[in-house]
Amino acid sequence: MTEQNIGEVDPAADDRLQLGLFMPNCRYAYSISTYKPDVDDWTYASNLKIARAAEAAGFSFLFPVAKWRDFGGVTQYLGTSLETMTWASAILANTARIKVFSTVHVPLFHPLVAAKMGGTLDHIGNGRWGLNVVSGWSEREFGQMNIPVLDHTERYRRTAAYIEIIKGLWTTEPGTFNYDSPWYTITNGYVSPQPIQRPHPPIANAGVSEEAKELVARLCDWAFISPPSIESVAGVTSDIKSRAAVHGRRVRCCLYPYVLWRDTEAEAHAEVARLKEHIDLEAARNWADGLTGRSGSFNDFSLEMFAIGGGALPVIGTAEQVAIKLSELYKAGMDGALMVFLDYYRDTVRFADEVMPILRRLGTIV
Ligand SMILES: Cc1cc2nc3c(=O)[nH]c(=O)nc-3n(C[C@H](O)[C@H](O)[C@H](O)COP(=O)(O)O)c2cc1C
């Protein structure tokens, strides 16, 4: 297993599309709509069932969302959620091959604490853990702790320091790492055990802005991206990859699509219509305002797009149509797909039966 790769065990699969699930560790993940086939899919028992189905299907990785309170509305969108470090610990302990990410909010976890927890998680999973570092954008979430959301530029400067510290603690002799910055000072920083993966577990960032792209190019292994249209994907992926090349690095891009297929195109679109019909407008506005208000990163998204998949790119149709679209996205530079499903457990099983054989035929996965 290489550090850059998310959870593949077959080296032949290294450069093929890596399939991941954006797990429903939060209630109402991820459509902002009361139309939801299984409202209780957020529970640990359900997450484990889905995780095991994804592992059996040959998916590469699982990825949670880290949220600290609801976004209002009748759904109390994402209000009930499993914290992602503790969640990953249990999922890793109960799976064998699939890679599992956690997400830390920079303002909430000291980097030494995150590095220590990460070392522990990578040992629990025997080298299958990855870290998503998010700068944090929600006044609604942080306000309850009276933690300010920094201005966007400073936010990302602090995130860069954060990642440099974590990498330093994971890769230098314990007790020897020093770092000075306006936000953190580390003196003879000590983390042991260090992670099993060398030089360190994959580090991801899911920012959209200029600052985020520069951060990813310089310091991360994976960029989780959310472009507003299929047509814009090639531009975004080549931009990120060429920025990384300037630093002599390789960064892979993982797109965040809402993959919804049914036996006919009409049935798939009928599901989307039901989501729209039952949209939780209040929560959708709160979500969109929080994300767009501070950075402009999601300005091209309509409220409806937020409502359908929380900001995911819709990939809708029959099994054949979605497989072809995913293959086109792979050719456009998408190395991984962090998929959002409507009916997580059933769709995971059906994806293995109905979509993966077509992706194999197309040479997109092995
Ligand atoms: C796939 C994906 C996963 C994300 N996960 C989280 C998360 O778990 N918690 C969170 O607060 N923000 C999350 N975000 C938000 C990003 O960290 C980021 O703040 C947002 O995309 C806006 O980009 P910007 O910070 O560059 O303006 C996620 C975004 C994407 C695209």
Image (spheres, rainbow, N blue to C red):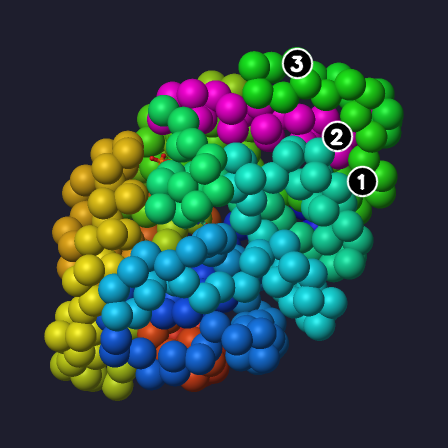
Secondary structure category for the residue under label 2? helix
Residue type at the position of mark 2: Leu
Secondary structure category for the residue under label 1? loop
In the picture, the disc for residue 194 is 1
Q: Residue at x 48, y 31 (%)?
A: 216
Quick check: 229 left or right of 30?
left
Q: Which quarter of the figure has residue 116?
A: top right
Asked whether disc 3 touches disc 1, contact meaning CB atoms under 8 Å apart, the reply is: no
**Cα–Cα span, label 2 and label 1:** 8 Å
Residue 42 falls within the magenta-colored stretch: no
Residue at which label 3 appears: 180
The range drawn in magenta is: 152-172
Q: Position of residue 143 (x, y in %)?
A: 40, 41
Q: Which quarter of the figure has residue 320?
A: bottom left
| Foreground residue among 181 and 13 | 181
Residue type at the position of mark 3: Asp
Q: Residue at x 69, y 55 (%)?
A: 128
Residue at which label 2 appears: 169
Q: How would you rate the neighbour count of disc 2 (Cα within 10 Å): few for under 14, some for 14-19, many for 20 or more?
A: many
| Foreground residue among 17 and 93 | 93
Q: Residue at x 70, y 39 (%)?
A: 113
Q: How would you rate the neighbour count of disc 3 (Cα within 10 Å): few for under 14, some for 14-19, many for 20 or more?
A: few
Asked whether disc 2 touches disc 1, contact meaning CB atoms under 8 Å apart, the reply is: yes
Instruction: Using the image, determine if residue 316 lies above or below residue 223.
Output: below
- Quarter of image, ligand 1: top left
In this view, the mark in front (3 or 1): 3
For marks 3 and 1, the one nearer the N-term is 3
Q: Position of residue 309 (x, y in %)?
A: 29, 62
For marks 2 and 1, the one nearer the N-term is 2
Secondary structure category for the residue under label 3? strand
For marks 3 and 2, the one nearer the N-term is 2
Report the magenta stretch's main SS. Answer: helix
